[in-house]
Image (cartoon, rainbow, N blue to C red):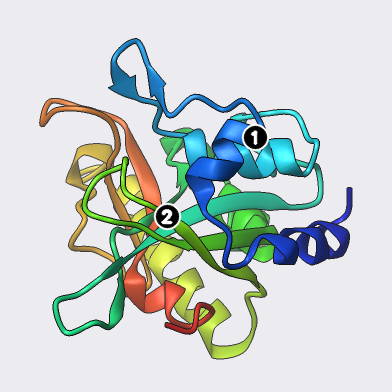
Amino acid sequence: MERKEAVQKLQQLVGKELHELANEYGVTIYRNGKVNKGWAGHVFERFLELPINSAQSPNFGSWELKSIPLKTLKNGTLSFKETMAVTMIDPVNVCQKEFEDSHLLAFLKKAVIVARKVGETVDEPSYIHSIVELNLEGDLYNAVKADYDLVRNVLLEPAKGFNSLTGKMGVYIQPRTKGAGHGSTSRAFYARPKFLKEFINI
C-alpha cells in the first residue's frame, strides 16, 4: 500500500474512538497485566490490513506509520503528551552516514502520523484527531540536518562519543536514552514538540 492510499484510508478514522477500534480489530490493550505499549499503532496497522513490523526501516517499504498522543490541558487546549520516538541511534551507522543517507531522514521523509487525543489513563476514551504526512524540506530540513550533524560530530569526537549524547541536544530532534530505567545504554532520535507543531495543527 502506497503512502497516499494509506493516508486517504486513515482519514476515515478521524473522530473515532480507539478502544472501540481495538475491540473491533482484536488488539489487546493489556498484555500479561501490563499495558501493551504499541496497541494504538497495532490498531492502525490492522485497519490498513498490514503486517505489524518493528524493523529499523519504514514499516511498509516506502513509508512509516507513527502514533502520537495529545493531552488536554486544564485551560482546554491540546498539547503534545510526549516526544515522538523516530529511530534508534546506531553509533557505527551514524558515524558512517551523512544525513542524506541516514535512517533518521529515511523515516522523517516518509512518515505518516496519526495524532490522537488521550485521557489521564489508558482506559479513558481516546479519539483520533488528525492524520498528517511528514514532508521534510526547506529550512526545517536544514535545521534537522544540523541536529543530526551535532549528534554525529559528538560520536566522531574521541573525547566524547556515545555516552556524551544527551536529551538537551538538538533543536527539533534530540538524542536521548531509550528503554526502562536510568541504567539504559541505548539511545534514540526523538522528535520534539517543536518539530511536531510544524505538521500537526493543535
Left or right position of 59 against 72:
right
Give me the residue at 56% from left, 36% from top. Answer: 22
Q: Position of residue 138 (x, y in %)?
A: 62, 88
Determine the image quadrant of residue 68: bottom left
Of the pair 131 and 29, the residue shown nearer to us: 29
Task: For mark 2, give the secondary structure.
Answer: loop
Q: Earlier in the sequence, mark 1 or mark 2?
A: 1
Give me the residue at 73% from left, 42% from top. Answer: 47
Look at mark 1 in the image and give the residue it sits on.
24
Q: Position of residue 69 (x, y in %)?
A: 39, 58
Q: Do residues under tags 1 and 2 come within 8 Å of each other at their CB atoms?
A: no
Find the distance from the CA under tag 1 to the CA under tag 2: 15 Å
Give me the residue at 42% from left, 75% from top. Answer: 195
Q: Relative to 1, say whether 133 is above or below.
A: below
Q: Position of residue 181 (x, y in %)?
A: 14, 28
Q: Amino acid at mark 1?
A: Glu
Left or right position of 100 against 86:
right
